[in-house]
Amino acid sequence: MNEIGLSEILVVSTVLFFTGVYGFLTRKNMITMLMAIELILNSVNINFVAFNKFLYADKLDGLFFTVFIITIAAAEAAVAIAIIIHLYRKLKSIDVDDADIMKF
């Protein structure tokens, strides 16, 4: 069997990263933008785990960074969803164009 190499993992991570960037820059829905940010963070996690496996197999630094990023992403998602719910209750929309900061 062929083992998946570092270059294949990095290609998948790059595609995932740029999919997230594209989704963040082109969408106006805040929930979709939040999911795009999560894609970007997950691509970074894939890079940390891949480099840890192929370059420093005896250390766990990449895995610790990945757990830290997952924790930060969970907190970021909770705060962002709370803000989005607040904006929806005030404006009846989660479109970025409708969320004018001067309305508050």
Image (tube, rainbow, N blue to C red):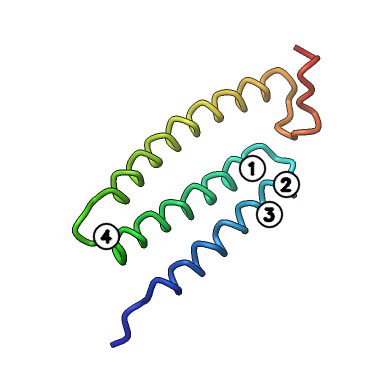
Instruction: Give the mark nearest the N terminus, 4 or 2.
Output: 2
Residue 9: image tag: none
Would you name the residue on which mark 4 appears?
56
Quadrant where the N terminus is found in the figure: bottom left
Q: Nearer the viewer, residue 15 or 33?
A: 15
Is the residue under label 2 in contact with that under label 1 (CB below 8 Å)? yes
When the figure is inspected, residue 7 is found, relative to residue 57, above or below; the finding is: below
Would you name the residue on which mark 1 appears?
33
Is the residue under label 2 in contact with that under label 4 (CB below 8 Å)? no
Q: Nearer the viewer, residue 83 or 73?
A: 73
Is the residue under label 3 in contact with that under label 4 (CB below 8 Å)? no
Is the residue under label 3 in contact with that under label 2 (CB below 8 Å)? no
Instruction: Give the mark nearest the N terminus, 1 or 2.
Output: 2
Q: Nearer the viewer, residue 74 or 40?
A: 40
Would you name the residue on which mark 2 appears?
27
Is the residue under label 1 in contact with that under label 4 (CB below 8 Å)? no
Using residue 35 as the reference point, say whether residue 57 is left or right of it: left
